[in-house]
Amino acid sequence: MEKGLIRRLLTVLILGAGCWPAAAQTASPPRGGDKASEALRPWLGAWDLEMADAPRGCSVTLGAEPAGDARQLRFPATCRRALPILDKAVAWAPAAGGRPRLLDAGGKEVIGFRSGSRETGLEGSGADGKAYRLVSKDHPRAPGSSQAATAAQRRTVVDPATAPAPASLPGRYALMRQPEREACRLVLSSSSASQNGTAPAGFEGSCDDAGLTIFDPAGWRYDGGRLTLVARRGHTVDLVFEKGQWRKDPTAGAPLLMRKLTP
């Protein structure tokens, strides 16, 4: 496998395996699509499921294979971390209006889509009271249809004059996917940086977060108010200082926060 492909796969994992940073690739039609009814056929295939106004999403497939009285719904297991509502979703079926709805094991609606089309994207709501959007991977997004996802991919402008001083950065940090929920601990070494400006870094103890473990931070550097974690294989993730802690920037994909711990 060529190095470029390995690097891209590892980058996906640090963002949250199974999650996507907004743009998606077109997938092949699911098995049995040629034998599906006219009511099912327009909805078969791969979609991007988004939580409205949040940089979270996941790739799901509306399949043609039977699943009880409905049809198979497929997605990576790690999607349940990006969109917890998917923990209950096991199948899908068209609603009375024809648009798809995601169902739990008992046939109860988990997410229903009330408006939109395959071409422009579907708008709906979940049993958790939150708004969701379903966008086909086979059609381009309509202008303005995903402003939150677009904004999530923009780099934050940083004023180096107000950013933390470089000397304050070495130390122990809590790595978090959600505020105040520690996933791992990371140590940024105060050792002298190498020729490319990178100083050593590494986990303190074990880390239970699969994406962070595979990313395997081995170094860090700081420039212009942006803190960069460097993976052992060389790929990177940037963070900016905001509200007393560091956050991943851009924010697309799974969140990542870093808070310095007291000695």
Image: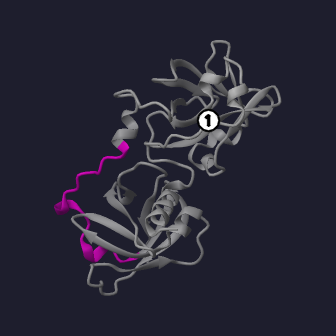
User: What's the residue type where badge 1 is placed?
Assistant: Pro
- Give neighbour class at mark 1: few <14, some 14-19, many 20+ (Cα, 10 Å): some
Quick check: 30 left or right of 220? right
Residue lying at 45% horizontally and 74% vertically, measured from the top left: 233
**38 and 119: which one is in front?**
38
Residue most extreme to the bottom: 192
Residue 168 vs 134, above or below: the answer is below
Residue lying at 30% horizontally and 85% vertically, measured from the top left: 194
Residue most extreme to the front: 34
**29 and 17: which one is in front?**
29
Residue lying at 52% horizontally and 65% vertically, measured from the top left: 212
Q: Position of residue 110 (x, y in %)?
A: 67, 30
Dominant secondary structure of the residues highlighted in magenta in the image: loop
Q: Position of residue 15 (x, y in %)?
A: 48, 56
Quadrant of the rendering where the C terminus is positioned: bottom left
Find the magenta span and give its range. 152-171
Residue lying at 47% horizontally and 68% vertically, measured from the top left: 2
Residue topped by disc 1: 29
User: Per the image, is 156 magenta?
Assistant: yes
Q: Position of residue 201 (x, y in %)?
A: 42, 78
